[in-house]
């Protein structure tokens, strides 16, 4: 008789796959997923980025500078790598940037700047050099009046070093400032490689070259002008400030004495002139963080490049003024102003929103899981109510057989309740309440069986018959 009571004893301990363990597992899995997402975001955010940089023409100082930077960036294994895109010149490089064929470009500040170009750095500054070779000496050689001023170039032949139209435009700006009609001078252009031979052969009366103060091309051209012991005459651009006022892409500048070497020094005194810059520009839509990283790397390796490439010393930060001729890129401005954003600065909002989204997804998942288990909870509640009713029924029972049937029903209720607990449909508190009700049921059954066993059999049968008659 008591075997049924032992089988239907107090609830067994929860299985290892309890709701609490499941919650811990889900929390751990979510944490690992979040860590993985952050690590993945960091990897993709910090993986090397290759930028296309348009530069030309071939064998120019700009090409050499970009090649040196490309190699240095690669060796440093930094965030930014460069891929040169060779063009026919600064104008073609500007076009490549405008058309989206390049991310960066080396352009001349005195040419048309693309609307989508923003300054990143000043690669170098170039000065305009105007000079007149000494008069030729020798029997039968005649020369015109000595040229000492720009205004005296009217009707003369002027040689321009380099094939780019930009140098011709530069000459015309200078001539117009001094009232010389460009249409009344003969302009002869020749490649930089042929400049020295052309000057020795007296192809022109005066020459113009544009490049850095320490440009080897300019120095070779000037030294080629020295003949018969005479030295070239440098034409000062005294109206440099007026030109800069009328043409903001130019600046008033000076050529220091002895800039081009030789004996005697060339020039033997400072010469006023105008200058313009070669800029590294970036597409307007290029990421601010990417441009900031490029600018940081550029100035970090500038010093180490100076031994191999002296022109690297001329690299300067861009003009960050609002009225700058070429507006500065926000990424470069952030580097110059010391406001460059760190990884957390750039992505903290995304991380925060990701955490919020993960929390919301967790809450939604928990609600959805609870919604799916509401039927189980409702069923378990009905089972508990049924168990409570069975307690009252056990105290009124007049049959051992009936009590045994009720005990079997309680066993099934226990099994269903434990299954709901394992599935997370009910909490540990609800299981505790069920345990109390089940214990009360066991006590009621045990007490009733003890009472029935102590009664004579005839009284048990009489009581059963009385109850049966009462139900009719």
Image (spheres, grey):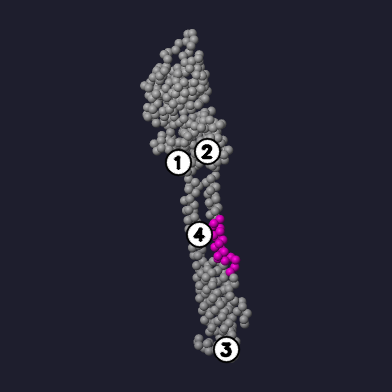
Residue farthest along the top direction in this orientation: 139
Q: Secondary structure at mark 1?
A: loop
* 182 to 471, vertically: above or below: above
Q: Earlier in the sequence, mark 2 or mark 4?
A: 2
Q: Earlier in the sequence, mark 4 or mark 3?
A: 4
Percent from the top left, x then y, of residue 389? 51, 79
Name the residue carrying label 1: 337
User: Residue at the location (53% across, 52% down)?
Assistant: 37
* 455 to 442, vertically: above or below: below
* 469 to 432, vertically: above or below: below
Q: Secondary structure at mark 4?
A: helix
Percent from the top left, x then y, of residue 442? 57, 79
Q: Secondary structure at mark 2?
A: helix
| Discs 4, 1 touching: Cβ within 8 Å | no
Name the residue carrying label 4: 362
Q: Residue 323, labelled with which disc?
A: none
Name the residue carrying label 2: 300
User: Residue at the location (54% across, 66% down)?
Assistant: 424
CA gap between label 4 and label 1 equals: 42 Å
Name the residue carrying label 3: 460
Q: Earlier in the sequence, mark 4 or mark 1?
A: 1
Point out the stretch of residues depicted in magenta.
14-32
Name the one closer to the observer, 16 or 241: 241
Occupied quadrant, residue 79: top right
- Decide if residue 86 is in sight here: no
CA gap between label 2 and label 1 equals: 16 Å
């Amino acid at each position: 008789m008591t075997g049924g009571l032992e089988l239907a004893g107090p609830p067994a301990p929860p299985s290892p796959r309890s709701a609490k363990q499941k919650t811990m597992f889900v929390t751990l899995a979510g944490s690992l997923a979040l860590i993985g997402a952050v690590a993945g975001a960091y990897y993709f955010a910090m993986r090397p980025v290759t930028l296309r940089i348009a530069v030309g023409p071939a064998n120019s100082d700009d090409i050499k500078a970009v090649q040196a930077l490309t190699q240095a960036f690669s060796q440093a294994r930094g965030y930014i790598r460069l891929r040169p895109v060779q063009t026919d010149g600064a104008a073609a490089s500007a076009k490549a940037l405008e058309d989206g064929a390049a991310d960066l470009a080396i352009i001349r500040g005195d040419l048309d700047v693309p609307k989508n170009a923003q300054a990143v750095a000043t690669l170098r500054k170039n000065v305009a050099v105007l000079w007149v070779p000494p008069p030729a000496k020798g029997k039968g050689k005649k020369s015109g009046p000595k040229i000492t001023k720009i205004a005296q170039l009217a009707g003369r032949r002027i040689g321009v070093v380099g094939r780019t139209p930009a140098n011709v435009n530069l000459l015309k700006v200078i001539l117009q400032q001094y009232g010389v009609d460009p249409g009344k001078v003969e302009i002869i252009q020749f490649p930089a490689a042929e400049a020295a031979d052309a000057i020795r052969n007296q192809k022109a009366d005066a020459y113009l070259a544009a490049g850095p103060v320490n440009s080897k091309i300019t120095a070779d051209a000037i030294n080629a002008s020295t003949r018969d012991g005479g030295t070239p005459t440098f034409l000062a651009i005294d109206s440099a400030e007026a030109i800069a006022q009328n043409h903001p892409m130019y600046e008033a500048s000076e050529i220091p004495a002895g800039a081009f070497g030789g004996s005697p020094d060339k020039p033997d005194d400072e010469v006023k002139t105008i200058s313009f810059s070669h800029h590294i520009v970036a597409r307007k839509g290029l990421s601010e963080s990417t441009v900031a990283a490029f600018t940081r790397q550029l100035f970090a390796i500038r010093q180490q490049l100076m031994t191999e490439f002296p022109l690297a010393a001329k690299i300067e930060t861009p003009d960050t003024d609002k009225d700058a001729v070429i507006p500065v890129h926000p990424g470069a401005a952030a580097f110059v102003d010391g406001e460059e954003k760190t990884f957390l600065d750039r992505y903290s909002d995304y991380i925060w929103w990701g955490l919020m989204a993960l929390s919301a997804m967790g809450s939604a998942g928990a609600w959805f899981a609870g919604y799916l288990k509401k039927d189980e909870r409702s069923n378990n509640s009905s089972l508990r109510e049924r168990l409570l009713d069975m307690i009252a029924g056990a105290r009124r029972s007049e049959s051992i057989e009936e009590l045994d049937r009720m005990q079997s029903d309680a066993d099934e209720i226990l099994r269903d309740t434990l299954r709901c607990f394992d599935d997370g449909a009910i909490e540990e508190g609800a299981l505790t309440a069920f345990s109390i009700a089940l214990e009360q049921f066991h006590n009621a059954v045990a007490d009733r069986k003890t009472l029935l066993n102590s009664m004579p059999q005839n009284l048990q049968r009489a009581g059963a018959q009385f109850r049966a008659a009462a139900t009719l």
